[in-house]
Image (tube, grey):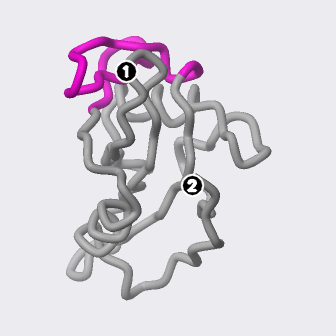
Amino acid sequence: MPHAPRPATDATTMSDALAQFEAEGYLAQMSAREGGLVLCLTCREETPAGEVSLQALIRTEGASDPDDMTAVAALVCPRCDAHGTVVLHYGPSATPEESDVLRELEDDRGETGISADEPTVGH
């Protein structure tokens, strides 16, 4: 699914990002697991983040707390082809699992690796 650029703005909330991806067909849910794995909640399979297709990424900041930094990623599960999202904290509030997944995701937008400190905006 090709996507137009999505600039991150201070007004973009996690709910907005999730709603945008849902409208584009990313209906499944995924989560970060220990060891840089992504769990697809559709097929219940864990996959190394480097094997999961990153389609888009939107950064958000909490309205009341700018340190509440999250990245909402649109992913495709290589096992069952589910199109879904995962919410990953980055920066000081990131868990080791979230940092590992952000670092290991293969960026299908033409970049390799994503900084766990400041992910790039997707398209």
- Which residue is located at x 44 percent, y 18 percent? 36
Which quadrant would residue 43 be assigned to in this image? Answer: top left
Name the residue beneath numbered marker 1: 80
Residue 40 among magenta residues: yes
Q: Amino acid at mark 2?
A: Glu
> Up-down: is 93 above or below 120?
above
Residue 74 in percent (x, y) is at 44, 49
Q: CA distance from mark 2 to mark 1?
A: 29 Å
Q: Nearer the viewer, residue 19 or 86?
A: 19
Q: With 116 as the anchor, is 13 left or right in this view?
A: left
Magenta residue span: 31-51
Which quadrant would residue 86 be assigned to in this image? Answer: top left
Which quadrant would residue 13 be assigned to in this image? Answer: bottom left
Q: Nearer the viewer, residue 71 or 78?
A: 78
Q: With 101 as the anchor, is 50 left or right in this view?
A: right
Name the residue beneath numbered marker 2: 118
Q: Quadrant of the C terminus?
A: bottom right
Residue 35 among magenta residues: yes
Q: Secondary structure at mark 2?
A: loop
Residue 91 in percent (x, y) is at 44, 50
